[in-house]
Amino acid sequence: MLDPTKERILDAAAIIIREQGSAALTVEAAADLAGVSRKTVYNHFENKYALIDDAASAWTARVMAVLAEIAADEGLPFITKLNKIVERAYAELKNSGRLLTGGAVSQHPRLASFQNMLQERLRGFITDILQNAINEGYIKKEFSSKRLTYVIVNFVVGLTVLDGVDEEAFSRVDVLKDSLKAMVGGILTDAGAEAMRGSPIFE
């Protein structure tokens, strides 16, 4: 179980990064928002970069836990479950602000470790969902769930290092939706296309 003080500091750091970007995160700012001393922050984190890394990791763990809980609900039909997962994932991405953008992670030296952790958590989760879709007859049999997993993970992780989007009229979530829409349209069977009508992917 996470130490309540550490959790408060991580929540404070995540809020600062999400709203202002990593440049605004200092040990002092995190301490002030969390209502603790600078010494307390240093008792839990070596420096601001460790704080950034752990705040991003904690956010990812929380999101993945929520999505895994939906995926484990055996009372939901597959398409309903998939739509709930997609809706929740999009909502979390929208709410992440600058937490998952270049402003949050690309400027600190532990980006590679963060990306590896994110990819590892996503891979198993997405592979299971895709394999279920293949088993249900919604995805053409020529496609491998493992290969498609890497395609989707590449889309998601690519959002963290994509430059220039923040100055555009569209968001990173819009880019992800377009990417998935283009890919999913090519892998679905006729039954899959019919079942996916009304999915958030195709809004």
Image: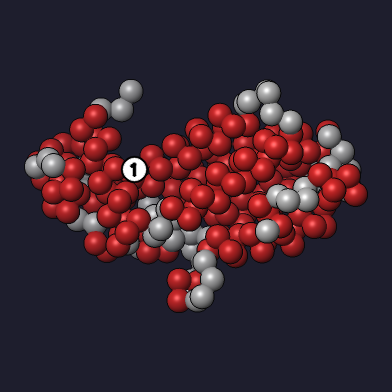
Q: Give the percent coordinates (x, y) of residue 123.
A: 62, 41
Q: Nearer the viewer, residue 198 or 133?
A: 198
173 up-or-down from 74: above or below: below
- Report the side of 121 relative to 177 (left or right): left
Q: Nearer the viewer, residue 111 or 5?
A: 5
- Report the side of 5 relative to 65 (left or right): left
State the colouring used for the structure image. secondary structure
Q: Quadrant of residue 173?
A: bottom right
Quadrant assignment for the N terminus = top left
Residue farthest to the front, as pictured: 198
Q: Nearer the viewer, residue 112 or 128?
A: 128
The residue labelled by disc 1 is 54
Looking at the image, which residue is at 24% across and 62% down? 24
Q: Give the percent coordinates (x, y) of residue 169.
A: 51, 75
Q: Quadrant of residue 6?
A: top left
Quadrant assignment for the C terminus = bottom right
Looking at the image, which residue is at 60% across and 65% down? 175
Q: Give the percent coordinates (x, y) of residue 98.
A: 39, 60
Residues packed near mark 1 inside 10 Å, few (<14), some (14 to 19) or many (20 plus) = some
Please state the total of marks drawn on the protein image.
1
Q: Give the percent coordinates (x, y) of residue 193.
A: 83, 50
The kind of secondary structure element at disc 1 is helix
* Residue 112 in view, yes or no: no
- Report the side of 22 relative to 89 (left or right): left
133 up-or-down from 3: above or below: below
Q: Amino acid at mark 1?
A: Asp
- Report the side of 114 relative to 148 (left or right): left
Looking at the image, which residue is at 78% across and 38% down? 133
* Residue 141 in view, yes or no: yes
